[in-house]
Amino acid sequence: MRVDKYLKNSRLIKRRTMAKEACEQGRVYINGKVAKPGDEVKVEDIIEIRLGTGSVKVKVLSTKDNVPKNQAQELYRNL
């Protein structure tokens, strides 16, 4: 699954366009490397998002598509 779509589906970033812009600005990392919006996310990948003054680091547990809002946190684990 594309990283911009994963960030939107997991509710880590509210909109896919915002996720795409964050990737283009070099604020999203997959396994320590800067991610492009079309980069693929796989189970066990580590994603780091740097927005504003803070950052979020998560481990991908699942890449399901169309997940209900109440199940979105099951897609990742905070590190």
Image: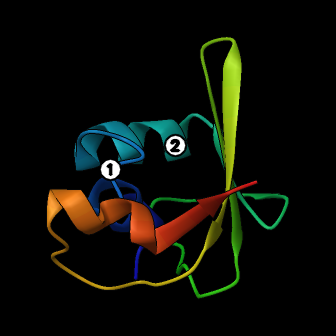
Query: Circle 2 is placed at which residue position?
Result: 24
Tag 1, which secondary structure?
Answer: loop
Q: Position of residue 39 (x, y in %)?
A: 54, 73
Residue 13 visible in the shown view? yes
| Residue 24 vertical position relative to residue 42 in the rendered view, above or below | above
**Circles 1, 2 touching at the beta carbon (< 8 Å):** no
Is 42 left, or right, of 10 in this rendering?
A: right
Count how many numbered circles sit on residues in the image. Answer: 2
Q: Position of residue 52 (x, y in %)?
A: 60, 14
Residue 45 vs residue 76, the one in the foreground: 76
Is 38 left, or right, of 58 in this rendering?
A: left
Residue ID at (68%, 20%) = 54
Tag 2, which secondary structure?
Answer: helix
Binning the other alpha carbons within 10 Å of mark 1 as few (below 14), some (14 to 19) or many (20 upward) gives: some
| Residue 6 vertical position relative to residue 43 in the rendered view, above or below | above
In which quadrant is the N terminus drawn?
Answer: bottom left
Tell me which corner region of the image, top left, top right, bottom left or bottom right, holds residue 68.
bottom left
In which quadrant is the C terminus drawn?
Answer: bottom right
The residue positioned farthest toward the top in the image shown: 53
Between discs 1 and 2, the one toward the N terminus = 1
Q: Tell which tag, 1 or 2, sits nearer the viewer.
A: 1
Binning the other alpha carbons within 10 Å of mark 2 as few (below 14), some (14 to 19) or many (20 upward) gives: some
Residue 55 vs residue 18, the one in the foreground: 55
Tell me the CA gap for discs 1 and 2.
19 Å
The residue positioned farthest toward the right in the image shown: 32
Residue ID at (41%, 83%) = 63
Residue ID at (70%, 84%) = 44
Residue ID at (41%, 74%) = 2
Type of the residue with mark 1: Arg
Query: Where residue 11 is drawn, which disc sits there?
Result: 1
Q: Position of residue 26 (x, y in %)?
A: 65, 39
Tell me which corner region of the image, top left, top right, bottom left or bottom right, holds residue 64.
bottom left
